[in-house]
Image (cartoon, rainbow, N blue to C red):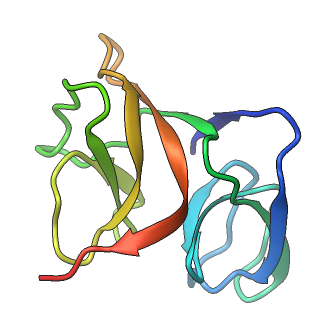
Amino acid sequence: MVFAETVPQKSVVFPNTTGADLKQGDFAVVGPFAGIADGDIAKDAVGSFHVEEGIRVNTADLVYGQDTFAILGQPVFWDASSLAFSDTETAGYYLVGYLLEVKDANGAIAFEKRRYAVEISS
């Protein structure tokens, strides 16, 4: 789960095509968007997602071994299979933002979310 610090942002309403139920605050790639669920959204149900670029995302959900996050501005990738973020460009992951705060002593990072997720190809 991530915590998004936002002022009122534009959201989009889409079916939850992630294959899983989402809780409010869950990060997901839905269609072309890097989104954060505005509320609980059951699998295949229609729900609202924050998609606006520039949302600050705080998370400690990091892919083990791909979690250095030591350089401000470095790309942040999303592994939809592990539901975690990575600092390593890997085929099948999505580019979802850029690092705002390096990994802290609690293993958490902050990044600025992109509006559109870009799937990394081989």
Quadrant holding the C terminus: bottom left
* Residue 117 placement (x, y as % from top left): 47, 68
Q: Residue at x 37, y 53 (%)?
A: 84
Name the residue at the top extreme: 105
Q: Position of residue 32 (x, y in %)?
A: 56, 79
Indicate the position of residue 56 as horizontal and vertical percent values. Answer: 59, 34
Q: Quadrant of residue 6?
A: top right
Residue pictured at 42% horizontal, 60% vertical = 83
* Residue positioned 70% across, 82% down in the render: 43
For residue 121, what is the image quadrant? bottom left
- Which quadrant holds the N terminus? top right
Say which quarter of the image contains residue 37. bottom right
Q: How many marks?
A: 0
Left or right: 101 as drawn, with respect to 67: right
Between 42 and 7, the one nearer to me in the picture: 7
Q: Does residue 108 appear to the left or right of 105 in the view shown?
A: right
In this rendering, position of residue 71 left or right of residue 82: left
83 up-or-down from 73: above or below: below
Observer able to see residue 52:
yes
Q: Position of residue 62 (x, y in %)?
A: 31, 43
Task: Decide which of 34, 41 is in the foreground and name it.
Answer: 34
Residue 27 versus residue 42 in the image, above or below:
above
Who's the residue at 64% across and 35% down the image? 3
- Vertically, is 25 above or below 34? above
Q: Is residue 39 visible?
A: no
